[in-house]
Amino acid sequence: MQKIKSLMSRQGLKSPQESVHDLSPVENFQIPAKEEQREPREQATDPLAEQELINSIEEIYFSNDSLDIVKYELEKLPPVLTLHEIEEYREKLKRQQAAVSRKVADLILEKQPSYVKELERVTSLQTSLQLAAVICTNGRRHLNTAKEGFTEASLGLLANQRKRQLLIGLLKSLRTIKTLQRTDVRLSEMLEEEDYPGAIQLCLECQKAASTFKHYSCISELNSKLQDTLEQIEEQLDVALCKICKNFDVAHYTKVQQAYRLLGKTQTAMDQLHMHFTQAIHNTVFQVVLGYVELCAGNSDTKFQKLPYKDLCTHITSDSYIPCLTDLCKALWEVMLSYFRTMEWHEKFDHEEPQAASDSTSVSATEENNFDRNYIKKKLEHGLTRIWQDVQLKVKTYLLGTDMSNFKYDDFIVVLDIVSRLMQVGEEFCGSKSEVLQESIRKQSVNYFKNYHRTRLEELRMFLENETWELCPVKSSFSILQLHEFKCLGQSRSPSMSPSKQATSADAAVVSLFEQYTSGGNPFEIQCVLKDDETEDVLAANGYESDELEKSAYQEYDSDSDVAEELKRDYVDEQTGDAPSKRETLRSRKRSDYSLNKVNAPILTNTTLNVIRLVGKYLQMMTILKPIAFDVIHCMSQLFDYYLYAVYTFFGRNDAYESTGLGLSSSRLRTTLNRIQESLIDMEVASENVGSLAPGEERKEKVPSPHLSHMVVLTESNTLYGLAQRVVATESLVFLAEQFEFLQNQLDSVMPAAKKPFLQQFYSQTVSTASELRKPIYWIVAAKAIDYEQQLLLMANVKWDVKEIMSQHNVYVDALLKEFELFNRKLSELSKHVRIPLPVSNILWEHCIRLANRTLVEGYANVKKCSNEGRALMQLDFQQFLMKLEKLTDIRPIPDKEFVETYIKAYYLTENDMERWIKEHREYSTKQLTNLVNVCLGSHINKKARQKLLATIDDMDRPKR
């Protein structure tokens, strides 16, 4: 079928009838004659039959391949030919051909209208082509006429004009190329002027212009040269970026950032900047430490330059340790300040430049700028922690490179102060708690503090053993806040703030260090200035602040203007009715309060002052370094414990008086003293062999018991058995306890929560017991100051079984009062040298009166025979004693007054009342009760009652035995 179509297309405008005659012989052989076509059409008119014939045609006849059909049919013939079979096959082929022909003819007839229409179009096209041929002919004719009408001169003129235009353009290009080749000189000048944005802008413009003239051979060399120049600019930019790390300059950094923005490498610039900061930290600390190591070595040996930083730190000497640390922190501060100012620049200026160009940039460019800004912001925020970590590690290596256990205290405090300030810088820099620094300084502090505290305890023992307990003259306005060691408290410093920071004003305390020193200065330069300004003015001249104050102390005492109205009234004695004059009353009060003889200055010794200074030093170390706060407070408590134990051991320990049962030492005081002895006192070390301590850790923490100096004499009666020394020692302990109470809130604020019960127990069980030492210490003086044995002997010579009531008291009362008057004079004389506070004088008088009253009871208990009149004489003697005694002292009521009166009056009780009285009054000894019963025998108690009462006394005494 395709062959038929192809044949039809090649025939052009011929009719189907004409086309038949033009076929090739082979094709003509295949197309039947008209008769043959007509015959099958007449024979086979059934469409289905024709379709079956067409379907029976072999597939090969429909293939596109050029096939020789004749050859194909001949090859199909069998080897033995039969005419009949051949004829049948021929007839079959004819029928098939006829069917195909009829089908083709039908299709041709079906497409006849389209064929005619297309034929008309072809005819129209032929007409148009003929018209076009005429137009082309006319055009050629006109062109020939134009050619003949113009001369060659005119055309040459046009050619020359065109060439001129081309040459002008070439000249302009050559001038541009010449300018491009000379730009390297201008670029060098701009780089020297550090105009990086201008240089990059010029270089990029040159590259853009060079790309326009890339068809010139000389431009390729210029392109490579511009590329090299751009790479050189980038290298210089990197160097300029490196300078930012140590000395940030806004104008300089702005140029650098603009340059990187022109290059489109803002993220790369930020990565490079962080690398430079890390390198700057390493190089800075290495150079600082190397400089000090070479300076201390004193030679130009280069071996130190090859050492790693960690090994280099071990070559720092103790003398250069603090200056090197200071310079190290100063250098690191400069690096961190530059980083802080870099962040500050990006927060302030990085948002302005993109906005200026936003009108002329596309949306994608704006998004890219936003992405770059977010990247830079996150990179800078992340870099804070990285840089501070590098700083911590470098300083940690330096701190642990030297053993500071033998440093002086002031030097070690300076180290703590510097590190504390550095930690504050870190907290403001990135909010870090500086765990690395805290751990390193904690190790050094624990190591240092153990050695330091051990040495201080040994020094305290030496001070106590050489202390003569003389009064250290200080001003009446003395306060521990006036001491160097407590300056931090006087300035209301927060516990986390270093002492050097107190030089700043109150307003500056609110401003961060980076804001405060952003324009210049260094937070590590303050310390040297502070120490020169610190002065102490706490000591008084000769015990008085001035001669005027000493004089006024007596003048004010003699004046009635400052005396309370109640004291100006006449005092009437309840027993005698005598009304002493106002002057006598004041004089009586004057004898009772010996503190008015001098200005009311604190009582303390040099050792006390030394302990207070130690406490201040411990407090400084504790507030600067909170992680070891508990260790410091524990050691601080040991200082107080040891001082308390020494005062008790020197002046208060006396087993004979402890057994009196008067409750001189409370159970809390005894518990505290036992605890101190067990935990702190090394009882196994002899005083002459103090240096040979056992190697055990527990023994290392203990201190030998101190011994009283041989210079202190406590056995002379004219000094009231060392009362001055006892007062100074005891009251200095009380003053020390008051200072500890003053510091309680400060200690509580830095104490870890888990350890606060220790602090509370220390204050409730130890500090509060300091004043309780007064009783046992002053009791010893009171027991020896008055000769109570002599009074017993005088009372033994008195006859108590008199038969008439006496109007005159006995001699022993006058003797006892003389003893009290002598005691009062000694006390007054002593108060001229040492101020005796009112509580002390009251305790002394109370002890003496109590002992005197108990001596009276003991003397009355020694009486063998006594009458009612003798009992009345006892009352008379006691009332006389009270009347005279009340003029000597202001203590009211008289201690143990009822103790004597009750014992005297018990003589008059009946049998039943006395039995009840004996059971109720267990404060009397068995001997005193027994004597009372025996004396009453014969007057109003019979023997049977006596036996009963003695049995009751024996029953009461049995549990005591």
Image: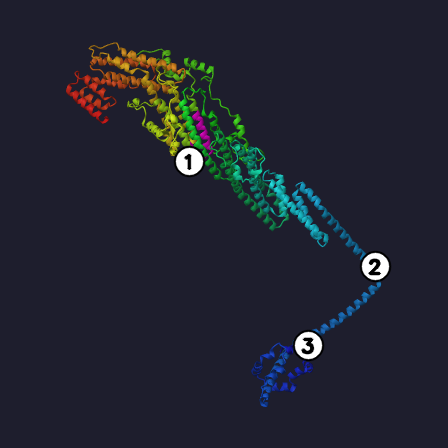
Residue type beneath disc 1? Pro
Residue 89 or residue 368, whichever sits in front:
89
What SS does tag 3 mark? helix
* Tag of residue 154: 2
* Tag of residue 332: none
Badge 1: residue crowd in 10 Å (few <14, some 14–19, many ≥20): some
- Indicate the position of residue 27 as horizontal and vertical percent values: 66, 82
The residue drawn where x is 32% and y is 25% is 665
What SS does tag 2 mark? helix
Q: Does residue 323 appear anywhere in the picture?
A: yes
Q: Is residue 629 magenta?
A: yes
Rendered-image quadrant of the C terminus? top left
Q: CA distance from mark 2 to mark 1?
A: 110 Å
Mark 2 vs 3, N-terminal side? 3
Q: From the viewer's perspective, is 499 left or right of 98?
A: left
What SS does tag 1 mark? loop
Which tag is nearer the camera, tag 2 or tag 1?
1
- Cβ atoms at labels 1 and 3 below 8 Å apart: no
Residue type beneath disc 2? Ser
Q: From the viewer's perspective, is 5 left or right of 497?
A: right
Mark 1 vs 3, N-terminal side? 3
- Indicate the position of residue 131 as horizontal and vertical percent values: 76, 71
Q: Which residues are magenta?
A: 610-632
Q: CA distance from mark 1 to mark 3?
A: 113 Å
Residue 683 placement: quadrant: top left
- Indicate the position of residue 192 as horizontal and vertical percent values: 67, 41
**Residue for badge 1:** 752
- Cβ atoms at labels 2 and 1 below 8 Å apart: no
Establish if 467 lies above or below 348. Answer: above
Residue type beneath disc 3? Arg
Mark 2 vs 1, N-terminal side? 2
**Residue for badge 3:** 10
